[in-house]
Amino acid sequence: AGLPERSALSQNYPNPFNPNTTIEYSLDRAEPVQVEIFDALGQKVRTLVDAHQRAGYYRLQWEGQTDSGKSAASGIYIYRLQTPSHRESRQLTLLK
């Protein structure tokens, strides 16, 4: 399908979710990438990606766990795609 014309973060699905959700994003160039999840207070809950990635389309899963392996509480979270050239955030809801 070729390479994306721009970097973008898609809305997760399903949303709300339990027990897991899918997050998709695209990169228009190769560069360092971070995809992180934050709670409503802005504290980092989970790092899903922290790596240099090629341009293309990506899909990943979040199972509602923190970096320490504990289950995250029900609530609204923010997930963020950040590269040197692009930053975008969206909301997701975990229901238990």
Image (spheres, grey):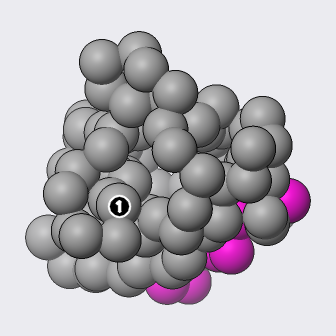
Q: Is residue 3 magenta?
A: no
Q: Residue at x 41, y 16 (%)?
A: 69
Q: Is residue 15 left or right of residue 81?
A: right
Q: Please determine whether, in this image, residue 92 is positioned above or below residue 61.
A: below
Quarter-of-image position of residue 11: bottom right
Q: Please determine whether, in this image, residue 30 is positioned above or below residue 91.
A: above
Main SS, magenta region, reads: loop
Q: Residue at x 40, y 46 (%)?
A: 54
Q: Position of residue 47 (x, y in %)?
A: 31, 39
Counting other residues with Cα less than 10 Å from the Cα at mark 1, is it few (<14), some (14-19), or many (20 or more)?
Answer: some
Note whether residue 63 is visible. Answer: yes
Between 96 and 55, the residue placed more toward the observer is: 96
Outermost residue, left side: 84
Q: Position of residue 42 (x, y in %)?
A: 21, 68
Quarter-of-image position of residue 5: bottom right
Outermost residue, top side: 69
Note whether residue 7 is visible. Answer: no
Q: What span is in magenta?
A: 5-14
Between 59 and 38, the residue placed more toward the observer is: 38
Which residue was labeled with disc 1?
39
Q: Residue at x 35, y 71 (%)?
A: 40
Q: Residue at x 79, y 66 (%)?
A: 15
Q: Is residue 75 left or right of residue 50?
A: right
The secondary element bearing badge 1 is classed as: loop
